[in-house]
Image (cartoon, rainbow, N blue to C red):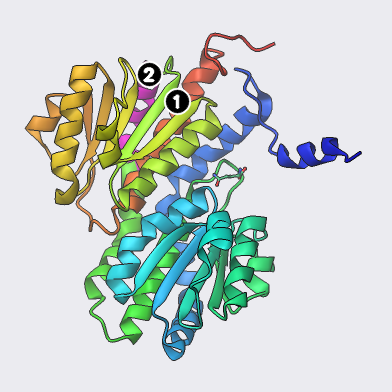
Amino acid sequence: MSDYTARLKALTAEPSKDTGDDAARRGRVGRTRDEMMDQGRVLDTTIAAEREACSTLARAVVERGVKRIVITGCGDSWFAAIGARLAVERATGLVVEPAQAFDWAHFASSTADASTLVIGISSGGSTPAVVASMQAAKAQEALVFGVSNTTGSTVLTDFDGGLVVHAQRRGWPTQSSTATTGLLIALGIEIGALLGRDVDALRKGLSTVGASMDAVARDCDDAARDWAAQIADASIVLFAGAGPHFAAAAFGAAKVRELSPIHAMAMPLEEYHHYRSQKRDDPLFLIAPDAASRERALDTALVSEDAGGRTVALLPGPDDEIDSRIAHSWRMPQVDDALAPLVYSVPLHLVAYHFAEARFARNLGYPGHLQAT
Ligand SMILES: NC(=O)CC[C@H](N)C(=O)O
């Protein structure tokens, strides 16, 4: 007979529990605080530290004549790839595909070839599905790079090159995910520059986005704490964002699931409208940084008002038609739409943190009405 006990133990190694007062989960929530408030500085540090490495890898990409870039990851690493796609496509003019690593390894790698660049992201450096995607890429003779927080790890040492994310992940992942997104964009800019493309605006935007991220963290802290306390009774939290902004939605939902620990769902903004997604009192975070998102964001505000949802929108400026139909609008700084995932992720991290703290204060685990035993 197989020993499924050991197998299950490995599968459930992350030690947090669903009780309202779980000490392991609470400890890690506490350690998330400083990390999430410091994301812009860490993004800047990471990009500065990896400047030479980015140049070296970009030269290899151009020498190879890469035509297509696939970025693989699981969880937050996959979301980082989704958040970087628009910026990397704009910078390089190449097709960029964010891919769930397991799915890509097993179902989508057959068309990779020597003109494909595959970038595998693993914070710990040896996530099996990510390593499998990189091995599948290697078997197809693709150029393969790794991105990781862990120096000396498999994804950095066993392939064609790597970039190190200089971020901490003692709390639940926040700064490691945004720094990874920023580092992918920095690599894209170096590749685009070598290809003779105009990357000046993006490069300039990336050089100031870190300061905006940390300003947003300070500016949104009180609003996030107040709103989290008001929605602390929720049993699900919804997030919606289009295109690259789906990455911010996905980070937000992942943090609620990890820290709280209730269900949370991220939707591409358009998908909200293909079901009755929001029920009475369901909290929704609507992420709409750009003109492309605006009309569907207004549609979402209309439906949300009609459904009796509790909605907060993250918007780049006043918008009476949206503002008047929802609970709150939080103003974000003006930022290039391709860099917006970096800025708009930050308040959602804060929401997840304060939501978890508000639920600990009420001894709410999962399901909400059960007391810890
Ligand atoms: N957010 C994720 O990508 C998963 C994080 C991982 N479970 C951790 O504990 O750090």
Q: Few, some or many C-alpha atoms within 10 Å of disc 2 (few <14, some 14-19, many ≥20)?
A: some
Q: Which corner quadrant of the image does residue 188 belong to?
A: bottom left
Left or right position of 351 against 206:
right
Q: Which mark is residue 294?
A: none
Single out the residue that lies furthest toward the right.
1
Please tell me the numbered disc located at residue 231: 2
**Residue 215: x and y, percent?**
32, 46
Q: Residue furthest left?
A: 320
List x then y, in percent, for residue 142. 54, 78
In the image, the segment drawn in magenta is 217-231
**Quadrant of the drawing holding the N terminus:** top right
Is disc 1 in contact with disc 2, using a CB cutoff of under 8 Å?
Answer: yes
Q: 215 or 359: which is nearer to us?
A: 359
Q: Is residue 147 above or below residue 368?
A: below
The residue labelled by disc 1 is 355
Q: Quadrant of the C terminus?
A: top right
Q: Is disc 1 placed on a helix, strand or loop?
A: helix
Tell whether position 226 is magenta. Answer: yes
Instruction: Please provide percent x and percent y for residue 2.
Output: 88, 41
Q: Residue at x 38, y 18 (%)?
A: 231
Residue 363 magenta: no
Q: Residue drawn at (31%, 24%), measured in percent from left and top? A: 278
